[in-house]
Amino acid sequence: PLPPIYAITPTYSRPVQKAELTRLANTFRQVARLHWVLVEDAARRSELVSRFVARAGLPCTHLHIPTPRRYKRPGLPRATEQRNAGLAWLRQRHQHLPPPQPGVLFFADDDNTYSLELFEEMRTTRKVSVWPVGLVGGRWYERPVVENGKVVGWYTGWRADRPFAIDMAGFAVSLQVILSNPKAVFKRRGSQPGMQESDFLKQITTVEELEPKANNCTKVLVWHTRTEKVNLGNEPKYHLDTVKIEV
Ligand code: UDP
Ligand code: MN
């Protein structure tokens, strides 16, 4: 059987949330053996996401953990606690099972755009695999630079000093690596903007060890799209609609 893919998605309440989750579910539903780990940035599971998960049509685990207020500031990394909650769930679920435990972990933000081919590529991850990400870092794409099948550097326009100059959407990790590095987590302390990926990856791998995917990192199969903030400027203060509709 195919190794399962665990997609960890942090998500938070906002006008476009259900639309984003719908787009994601429509993609993920087409991927074999994909298990969706949705982690709400909230003190409790919301009704909207609970209802959504029940009808999503694919295996889902619905977690929640709120980001402490002091970390909800522009310039600070987002979704640290949520990704760690997903990692903790994954480790707990497998801790009493004997190896080898096939599986691949991928951090799937709720606003990106994922091709189906991306999942075929990451499925064969042995330790940590990498690939280009489109529309990120102020460029058309960022990508690992590959020579003779090995990653030797990074094509990026932003903070080229990063040890792993890669977006969250640009790598996958085998379950085995997650389980054999039980302390690897995303850190709040000392983590500067854009360093989350590097801080995490340096706990579990080296640049030499990375497995290039997507034809030696020459194809864009995922896009760091961002959804425009919705204009609700015409919402009525009075004369509300006669029915209450979830959007
Ligand atoms: N996110 C979250 N809480 C927040 C802000 C963001 O859980 O307060 C989630 C969001 O839903 C997404 C991920 O964290 O899945 C990354 O956030 P965003 O897409 O805003 O970051 P960017 O695209 O700017 O890297
Ligand atoms: Mn995003």
Image: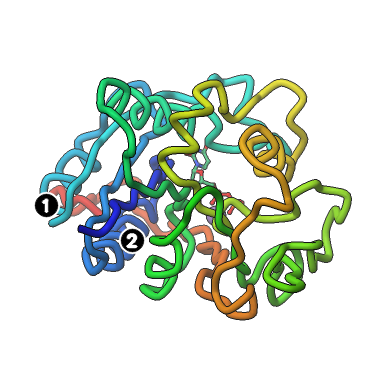
The answer to whether 163 appears left or right of 91 in the picture is right
Residue type at mark 2 is Leu
The answer to whether 92 appears left or right of 239 in the picture is right
Check disc 1 and report the residue beneath it.
55
Quadrant position of the C terminus in the picture: bottom left
The answer to whether 92 appears left or right of 216 in the picture is left
Rendering coords of residue 135 (x, y %): 64, 71
Q: Quadrant of residue 16?
A: bottom left
Rendering coords of residue 37 (x, y %): 32, 41
Q: Does residue 213 sit above or below 160 in this rendering? A: below
Q: Quadrant of residue 205?
A: top right
Q: Residue at x 63, y 69 (%)?
A: 132
Q: Does residue 145 sit above or below 238 in this rendering? A: below
Residue type at mark 1 is Arg
* Colouring style: rainbow
* Farthest right residue in view: 161
What numbered label is drawn on residue 24?
Answer: 2
Quadrant position of the N terminus in the picture: bottom left
